Amino acid sequence: MKRTLVIAAAATMLLAGCKDKKTMENPFFSEWNTPYEIPDFQRIKTEHYMPAFREGMKQQKEWIDNIANNSEEPTFGNTIVPYEYSGQLLQEVSAVFFNLSECENSPEMEAIAEEVTPLLSAHEDDIALNQKLFARIKAVYDQRESLDLNPEQRRLLEETYKGFVRGGANVPEEQQARFRELNEQIASLTLRFAQNVLKATNAYKKALPNGDTVTLDIPTWEPFMQTCPDRKLREEVWHAYADRCREGEFDNTKIIDTLVNLRLERANILGFPTHADYVLDDCLAKTPANVYSCLMDIWAPAIKVAKQERDLYQKMLEKDEPGAKLQPWDWRYYAEKYRAEKYAIDDAEVRPFFSLDSVREGAFMVANKLYGLTFKERTDLPTYDKEARCFEVRQGDSTVGILYMDFHPRASKRSGAWMTEFRGQHRDRKTGENVMPIIQVVCNFTKPTADKPSLLNFDESETLFHEFGHALHGLLSKCTYPSLAGTNVPRDFVELPSQVMENWCRHPQVMKMYAHHYQTGEAIPDALIKKIAAAQTYGQGFMTTELLAASLLDMDYYSIKEKQHIDPIAFEDEHMAKIGLIPEIISRYRSPYFQHIFTTGYDAGYYSYTWTAILDADAFEAFAESGDLFNPELARKFRHLLESGNTVEPMDLYRAFRGKDPSPKALLKRKGML
């Protein structure tokens, strides 16, 4: 792909009289002379972002004005298509900046984010509320039945129209100023929330008696909670994690109060009774009632098992400390202790067979057997950090895309694991040539030491497979239009390609193929595979309950129908008590650091992990039933699902693969709750 339009526009700006040397040298304004036009990370400096953001917004505004003011009758070709391809420079700088701000953050990047966020919000509103533009889009939409469009063009038209309606195009003029204000405030608050969580997480370091240090990053925090015999120390470290951002310098409670009410007000302006109704109208679930029904169907068996687990650990605690009552900071310790006793297995036994390199190669192997992909590490391609590894993804003699994998914690990186993209797959508007994707997978696994590689526990191994599944969704995309490509699907469908990959990770046959001892090269013994398989249903009461609790908490926040003062701590306590969550378990994320629903786009959508778990278990059941985990015909059908992005109604894609609607039985069976 050539950035001709972007470069030409930037050159015009320079010739118009801009002589500033820094602007002249801005890499966003010149061709990236890099393989595959990868962003020129080495040349990009923090001072380049704001000029590029401003120029990108300026270019898109001019492009939009040309569409809106076109004197010709609105058509798909002169309205929908040029709108779809508008803002190329803005998309490029946004992808680089916001991806790097998540894994290469700094005070300078934070300052830029604070400056540009309200500008971008206002810019997006200028487009969404442009009545002349919307009138042209609506005119084409109203003619859709008589237009000679192929299915993907029809889908683009429908999604574009729906996007404008959901973005406020029908908001009455007298409410538009308030609507803009709401969007700007929401954008700024989500940014502040995320920054507070990152700072609070980085601020805590606890020196241990043995000389080690525990932090609030999961790769160090969770093993500590599982193995520390000192109950008072466990309590201290648990509170440091669970009480983040509820008071003090990084307090997020007031942000939550404001944010929830602002989202409600915005939903009301758009004609929805709640924010959840607004969000779900564009998802497979459609209504809050459907979400609650799905979650509560699984809640009943999950909480039953969780209570059995609680009673077991309570007895174990009483043996150690007679009269003591089980607390949340005890749960992981006794769960791990029982797991080691019951299944004669612990992380120390498992980790040597799951080195990061072995697990990564295992994921690559599964992709090769299913889809024929190969992965070649490229140390000669530009990277944004020395720890980021770059792979060229190939299908035979053709390059499919570029994959960055960034595995270890840094102070500049937010916690968790995610997939994103520096460039999504699509076809060039003018040439029709395929534009290959540049995908990024980011995790936070323990760093290697001088004498030991990064060794993963089994949950972390599944995390790598999970995020790699998202990457495959982006890499295998075969769509024309960028907004329909790859992972641009409803939130309660996007987790299917990722979660289904976890099934291969945990299958005994596949483990035998990739899990090898990092020192001896020995394949994982059958006895250990059996232990891992037997332990798969262990602890599911806790894991399922904490996930469902977070999902229900999310829905409760965004199902409120009237503006009200929200004390997040009291709100959470009340609503967790209402569903019968036992006090020994907390929501997977407590409100003040629940980034999924307050910053990263899963507001009224955290349920999707459970919703799509039903799909992924049912989908993998097809491979298991066939007797071939790499069944070529099923792989071909599932690849079609991955390739199609949002060009087809998602459940139609699923039914085409499975031949029927999904059943929750496979999920309950997998969890040992059937």
Image: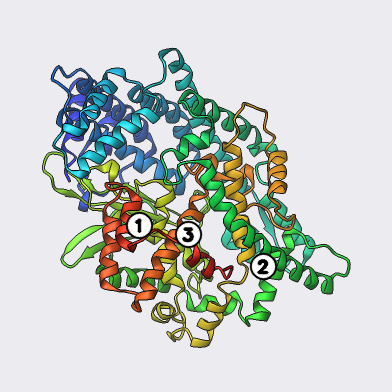
The single residue placed furthest to the right in the displayed view is 323
Residue shown at the point (42%, 64%) measured from the top left: 618
Cα separation between marks 3 and 1: 18 Å
Please state which amino acid type lies under the numbered disc 2. Answer: Gln
Name the side, left or right, on which 124 lies relative to 272. Answer: left
Task: Give the labeled residue for mark 1.
Answer: 471
Residue shown at the point (44%, 81%) measured from the top left: 516
Camera-nearest label, 3 or 1: 3
Please state which amino acid type lies under the numbered disc 3. Answer: Ala
Label 3 crowd bin: few (<14), some (14–19), many (20+), radius 10 Å? many
Residue 121 in view: yes
Task: Give the labeled residue for mark 3.
Answer: 613
Task: Give the labeled residue for mark 2.
Answer: 226
Q: Nearer the viewer, residue 16 or 538?
A: 538
Residue 40 in view: no
**Would you say the residues marked 2 and 1 are in contact, meaning their CB atoms lie under 8 Å apart?**
no
Q: Is residue 611 above or below residue 44?
A: below
Residue 274 in which image quadrant: top right
Residue 540 location (% of width, % of height): 60, 66
Residue 588's tag is: none
Residue 493 location (% of width, % of height): 40, 51
